[in-house]
Image (spheres, grey):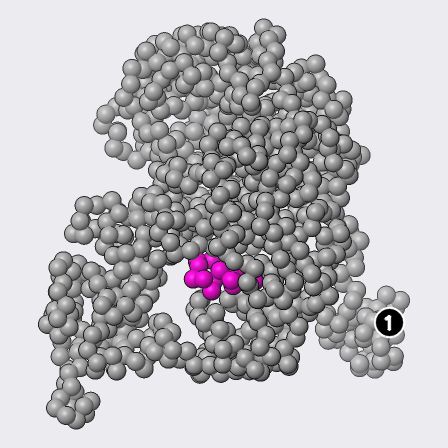
Amino acid sequence: MDPNEHENGNGNGNGNEDLMPPPPPPPIVPADVEPVKVDLLDLPPEPVKKKLPTRLPIARKGLGSKGTKLPLLTNHFKVTVANSDGHFFQYSVALSYEDGRPVEGKGVGRKVIDKVQETYGSELNGKDFAYDGEKTLFTIGSLARNKLEFTVVLEDVISNRNNGNCSPDGASTNDSDKKRMRRPYHSKTFKVEISFAAKIPLQAIVNALRGQESENYQEAIRVLDIILRQHAAKQGCLLVRQSFFHNDPKNYADVGGGVLGCRGFHSSFRTTQSGLSLNIDVSTTMIIQPGPVVDFLIANQNVRDPFSLDWAKAKRTLKNLRIKASPSNQEYKITGLSELPCKEQTFTMKKKGGNNGEEDATEEEITVYEYFVNYRKIDLRYSADLPCINVGKPKRPTYVPVELCSLVSLQRYTKALTTLQRSSLVEKSRQKPLERMNVLNQALKTSNYGNEPMLKNCGITIASGFTQVEGRVLQAPRLKFGNGEDFNPRNGRWNLNNKKVVRPAKIEHWAVVNFSARCDVRGLVRDLIKCARLKGIPIDEPYEEIFEENGQFRRAPPLVRVEKMFERIQKELPGAPSFLLCLLPERKNSDLYGPWKKKNLAEYGIVTQCISPTRVNDQYLTNVLMKINAKLGGLNSVLGVEMNPSIPIVSKVPTIILGMDVSHGSPGQSDIPSIAAVVSSREWPLISKYRACVRTQSPKVEMIDNLFKQVSEKEDEGIIRELLIDFYSSSGKRKPDNIIIFRDGVSESQFNQVLNIELNQIIEACKFLDETWNPKFLVIVAQKNHHTKFFQPGSPDNVPPGTVIDNKICHPRNNDFYMCAHAGMIGTSRPTHYHVLLDDIGFSPDELQELVHSLSYVYQRSTTAISVVAPICYAHLAATQIGQFMKFEDKSDTSSSHGGLTAAGVAPVVPQLPKLQDSVSSSMFFC
């Protein structure tokens, strides 16, 4: 037998040929034979590759030329790399304690590695490290050996170990106490193992700038980003991904509830058409209000004094936060609270006897309060009746009175913000363009990257000026209203004053429901009818009776209130209404909203509009009517090019436009299913009319996993089939030749999944409908979550609506562009970054940019151009609204009754959403 056969994957795999008959041409391995380990074989991946040709994002075809040229500045700073022939060497770092236990805690790694450099500088050839704070470090050039081991001793490590049930040591002042504490707290030995992992050429960056991306390029850029992170860590910053936050109170904005918005900076290296650049932007994270624990809790729970606090809630809020205990200034992590108040909580104190030290120690039960007041002579003003803070282990507690504890600064707050906190944050963190430019200039100066030794060694220098780019301002599309009226929007805005809607829907068989909102309901209805008629919307008088909520149900749970209201509507109306106007008492986040929408849309198929009237004027009523008209099937305005159809490509052959988005639960809600929404255009050649399909999927999963869902040989219950059939029936029995997909919310690392997983599912859904049908695809990802901003040199204004940038700071190879379609009225405009991943259809750069621009003008809810294409906004609205359905469901009930597999085929079972009634499923219910 040839000894190489194993390697080539041709051998039988056991070396015991006597047991086997001669193998037939493709070798068959019998059951009793132990196969060769799979990792030796080169063959298995092959068939997979053949089955699915991997699509990659397409290259740029050229630049757009339409529009008025406009010189702009952007917050990218040019980076020059002088030393491109060097290498980064990557090493794995393993940290353990003396006894071999691995080091789990965060934060200690950097201290240990700093100590290694300080202690063993000569053995490390004086090399600088770029350390990620966890398990990887990089050097320029190699270390002396491939594996190095060191032992270091750290003073002052904050340890979670404590002296158990002995005296609480949060506030030591006398010497004997200090001596007793020194051992567990003040030094610790660590073992450090550094072993070679990979070699990354700096040349990879240079190649990437020529558009030749290699595996190494991402890694090389990552090293540069790690150098920046480390630079910030050494300045004592809080690090959050690529953002850095300094401990400086002037960067804090109080948003209420004991939470502060902390302003810092994002900085990351980007490869662009004009070379490497450093993108620096203002960034905000949420932190806990530093200072006395009690002050934080009072703000967090919105109570008057410490004696009104809910301590069960406080215990959950405080867990794992770090405090400093006075007067020793020692830092600890909070593990819990004492069961009893300070004056009743006891512990065992060892008392030394005579001169023999520990030998004659006696033990005494003493309360924490007595210990601090009598032994430590610390005056406690209000702690006696409050729980103590435990900084020890739950089973070996160490208690400190609450008034001696202060929260350390720069501790992240990761829970979802309330509506009030969010609006306060937006208000306090907005910056006009000129102010933002000044802040960024200042940030670059203070960051002092010029003196960062590793950047110096790579020969990297960072320019101090903003990069100049050329923008183009596209002309706004012409809009059509009722009575054949045309209008050219100015500055991305228009209004419906003295105009009629282009396609009115009739408002008939409707009633008004009032859930205890205080207002003149009859006056409101009268004004609404008058306003509707002025806008050309035919409206009947509503049913005579206004369904006022019965006072006895006002305090009942939301589901009960909705149920009771529907019992009355059913009893008192002659038949099902086709529209219900619902008045809610709270303007935002009403608990009634989700159950009410679910009842109307999923159970009865009734179109409904919720309002919470505070200031009612013509503008308010017009906005409400725009939503109602769109929900009932009307259109408020359309593009001129839709009506005489002349949109390039789209108007010539049947084209469906899809908007796709996934919305996830708030941070910290890991058990709430994610909600995927896909909206699709209907009634071609229109591009202003959409419908939605919404499904739940596994929490935090970004890829949409129900696009194609074959349940039997003939049945597909996926999202795409439903939307394609709707397009076909609403567009004169035509199948779309072109499918344009706008995808929101995915990062660059997920582009290949969109192209190869989601798109494959969409193609499968098409083939399942008709094997012979081969539509062409255009796939575009829209990103709002990036840090590129544009400024007009010397002007206080934002860039004008319709500004597009596709040069200089865009990708060196891929087809991307930035667009600011909207007029930024407050703060600094955030452009949308569009990435064209695939274009089988054959748009020119100008045609594509015009289409994207036009789709920002078809949003039926507003009279302004919006910042991202309407289909994506609609997908977001649909996901959010239907997500509210699940708010008050009993989880155990839904989980057991509806099944759903996750992408991996194993379930935490995801509760399914109820189907919408046919009468509303193809409406713009989300408008």
Judged from the image, the secondary structure of the residue bearing numbered disc 1 is: loop
Q: Which residue occupies 62% across, 31% down?
A: 803
Residue type at mark 1?
A: Pro
As drawn, is 91 to the left or to the right of 28? left
Where is 757 relative to 567, above or below? below
Residue 97 image-quadrant placement: bottom left
Whether residue 585 is in magenta: the answer is no
Where is 863 relative to 21, above or below? above
Q: Which residue occupies 44% across, 83% down?
A: 98
Segment colored magenta: 227-241
* In-front residue for pair 735/819: 819
Q: Which residue occupies 44% across, 22% down?
A: 608
Q: Which residue is mark 1?
A: 23
Where is 356 relative to 290, above or below? below
As drawn, is 483 to the left or to the right of 362? right
* In-front residue for pair 643/704: 643
Q: Pinpoint residue 372: horizontal percent, then vertical percent.
A: 15, 70
Q: Which residue occupies 50% across, 37% down?
A: 433
Where is 660 relative to 497, above or below? below
> If the image is split into quadrants, where does the N terminus sit?
bottom right
Pointer 1 local density, CA inside 10 Å: few below 14, some 14–19, many at least 20: few
The total of numbered circles placed on residues is: 1
Residue 67 visible here: yes
Q: Pinpoint residue 58: horizontal percent, then vertical percent.
A: 75, 43
Residue 919 visible here: no
Q: Pinpoint residue 119: horizontal percent, then vertical percent.
A: 49, 81
